Image (cartoon, rainbow, N blue to C red):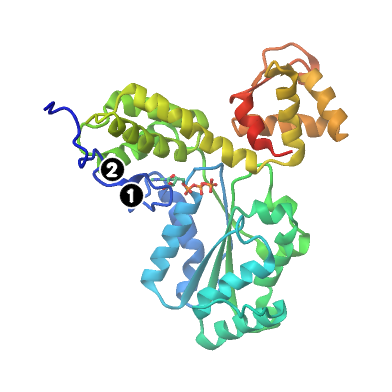
Amino acid sequence: MNKDLLLWDQTIFRDEQYFELDYLPENLLHRDSQMRSVMFSVAPALRGATPLNVYCRGSPGTGKTSVVLKVFKELENTTQKVIPVYINCQVDSTRYAIFSQIFKKLFGYPPPSSGISFKKLFSQIAKHLVEKKKVLIVALDDVNYLMMSKEVNDVLYSLLRMHEVVPGTKVGVIAILSDLTLDMARDLDPQVQSVLLPEEVSFPKYSRSEIRDILSHRVKYGFYPNVVSDELLELVTQYTEETGDLRVGINVLKRAGLNAERRASKIVSREDVEKAYEGSRYIHLNYTVRNLKKEEKVLLKCIIDSGKYEMMSGELFECFKGNTGLGYTSFYEMVNRLEGLKLVNVDTTGKGTRGQSRLVSLKYDPKEVEKRLDI
Ligand SMILES: Nc1ncnc2c1ncn2[C@@H]1O[C@H](COP(=O)(O)OP(=O)(O)OP(=O)(O)O)[C@@H](O)[C@H]1O
């Protein structure tokens, strides 16, 4: 028997949980200052006072959710006075749904399925907080989903002015935003802004060496020794840096490991990684396309329909204008945003005025983009 081959009951994974996307690492590398800032803002709650509100801002896969969940875990381990509630706004995207989740966390069961009015839901939550002397902290992850539906003002207003309706309630909000074209300071009603006044915590993209550090940690604990060479770790790092999203690297490692196992190999090969990347790179595409505005999708569709997968920006603008009725400023902003999201490349070597002769090209296979556009 070839001893280099894996037996059917053997595995190269020491612990597969290190490659799960919801795995919360014990140590969040390179996010000390963000951890400190969020902890500092919520610290007043430990003393029974109202915490500062926080606004975490950064592109996808830069550790925002992980930092907030880590702080929540610490809070729950430290005190009974604070009730942290994590809301995924993509799932719970209305004020009623969000308050139902808060109710469930406070009481341990959901509000009656027969349905109660929002007013009643609100007052039961507030009453409970006052009676039990608890401070409520609500994390609104992917708050852009509330901003698109304009629900955000109602949600924040209800949370942050709860103390005016029911004196004695203490509530803090942590808003997490990964759509960098939106801005809480600009896109909220002035009345809401005047009560939110958040501490902004920014999450820059990880540098190449930071990505390498984080991924090598996963390799060390997730695989047995020598399964992934340094050279291949570098390749995965490079792929991850191209999308700027750590999820891609983590998923490439997992898939590459599975590819190796399928070949009954005890080590991961370059082909295993390259094949894995073909699947994993679309994680970023799925996430970003889903969050685009309709007009941005139209812009991508114009490039796809041209059949060339790249277009001069003047020509692209004509198509965009024809389909949306929007002007050049919106177009210019959207192209920049799509570039920032790493969906298109913009070649700025052209000589035209106001960037009219920039070459805009798709970074992904047009067929893969089109499948996800949903317009
Ligand atoms: N500093 C870090 N150390 C270790 N793992 C990390 C770190 N930052 C992020 N990760 C991992 O990367 C993945 C994405 O992180 P996370 O969900 O926190 O990012 P995010 O900024 O909230 O993304 P999004 O905006 O897309 O929701 C997770 O699997 C997480 O475990």
Q: Residue at x 67, y 34 (%)?
A: 337
* Drawn side of residue 311 relative to residue 77, left or right: right
User: In the displayed structure, would residue 346 be above or below residue 225?
Assistant: above
What amino acid is labelled 2 in the image? Gly
Q: Residue at x 75, y 30 (%)?
A: 299
Q: Residues within 10 Å of mark 2 (few under 14, many from 20)?
A: many
Marks 1 and 2 sit apart, C-alpha to C-alpha, by 7 Å
**Mark 1: secondary structure:** helix
Q: Quadrant of the C terminus?
A: top right
- Percent coordinates x, y for residue 30 in the rendering: 40, 44
Q: Is residue 226 visible?
A: yes
What amino acid is labelled 1 in the image? Gln
- Percent coordinates x, y for residue 159 in the rendering: 65, 71
Q: Pointer 1: what residue?
A: 17
* Drawn side of residue 80 relative to residue 100, left or right: left
Q: Pointer 2: what residue?
A: 222
Which residue reaches farthest bottom? 131
Disc 1 and disc 2 in contact, CB within 8 angstroms = yes
